[in-house]
Image (spheres, helix red, strand yellow):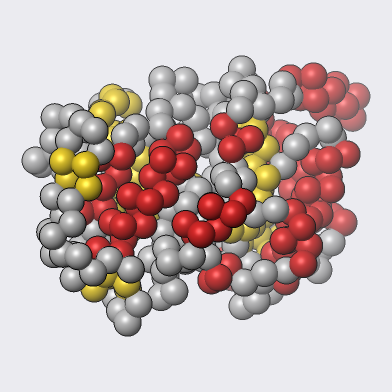
Amino acid sequence: MCTDVEKVWWTGVKTVLPQNLGKVLWPGVFTKGDLLEYLATVGTVMIPHLKDRPVTVIRYPDGIEEEGFFQKHPPPGTPDWVTRVTIGEGEAIVIDRLETLLWLGQLGAIEYHVTFSRFPAVDRPTYLVFDLDPSVEGFAAVCRVALMIRDVLTRLGLPSYPKTSGATGIQVYVPIHGSVTFEQTRPLMRTIAKYCEHRAPELITTERRVRARGNRVYIDYLQHAPNKTLIAPYSPRAVPTAAVSAPLQWEEVERGMAPENWTIATMAKRLQKMGDLFAPVLDPGVDIRPLLQHLDELSSKRSP
């Protein structure tokens, strides 16, 4: 992708001077220059999904074949123009401008994981997310589970938007009004996950222990919690194909697809053709308080 080692990206505020663009990050596939070009190209679409959300990046300065490391707090030498927020006793980075994204890419940050809530309302999620993790190779089973969750959410009157994890899974998002806490949303997410498990126990599990899952798809609803993070839309992944976390149409899930088709080399063209399929997730979302109240009433009636 990127062959001009003298290339400089001007973002309107700061100049990001990339170095070592020929450094191989995905062996036999892509370099740091390719990563930076990708981030520069999709940044305007990606940043709204990062803005106001503390980010944890995974850096691979020597490429994905070497061990990476998590970076949550601003490292020494962080530029003054990088936005920081204080959470608990520490600072976290927020990516609210393109130059921050490119600066992190220059540091070898390949993966970008964000919180389920926006700062400063750290205890109030802006979406529900069902993270589906298959236990065996193949994508067909995880597609079946995603469609099952979609159908349940539809019957509950909730919109849903799928994306690949960029690895082996699918994540199903429900944008919600930011007026409820994680603690309030947990019973609803648990109920939906357990219902799906009950309907298809041979296909689905909510068992957290990996060795007890067998070949079933794990619905992870426990990850949906304060200070937890999930891979951001359009973030690259540290996998050999340089796949990215790609928003999907439900029709694509119905047809089945190969997540490795969407990489840092192909996503820009997809965005030109389809736009940001995850744009509705940025909207205020639905008010789920009546649904939570109804669930609470049902639970109370079942209690002795």
**Could you tell me residue 244's position as x and y percent?**
47, 60
In the displayed structure, would residue 150 be above or below residue 257? above
**Could you tell me residue 274's position as x and y percent?**
61, 51
252 lies left or right of 124: right
- Residue at left 20%, top 54%? 106
In the displayed structure, would residue 184 be above or below residue 258? above
In the displayed structure, would residue 148 be above or below residue 117? below
Q: Is residue 239 visible?
A: yes
- Residue at left 46%, top 27%? 118
> In this orientation, which residue lies closer to the viewer: 48 or 163?
48
- Residue at left 55%, top 58%? 270
255 lies left or right of 168: right
| Quadrant in the rendering for residue 63 | bottom left
Q: Is residue 231 visible?
A: no
**Could you tell me residue 196's position as x and y percent?**
81, 52
Q: Residue furthest left?
A: 77
In the displayed structure, would residue 186 be above or below residue 139? above
| Quadrant in the rendering for residue 282 | top right
295 lies left or right of 49: right
- Residue at left 72%, top 21%? 287
> In this orientation, which residue lies closer to the viewer: 36 or 130?
36
**Could you tell me residue 246's position as x and y percent?**
55, 56
> In this orientation, which residue lies closer to the viewer: 86 or 272?
272
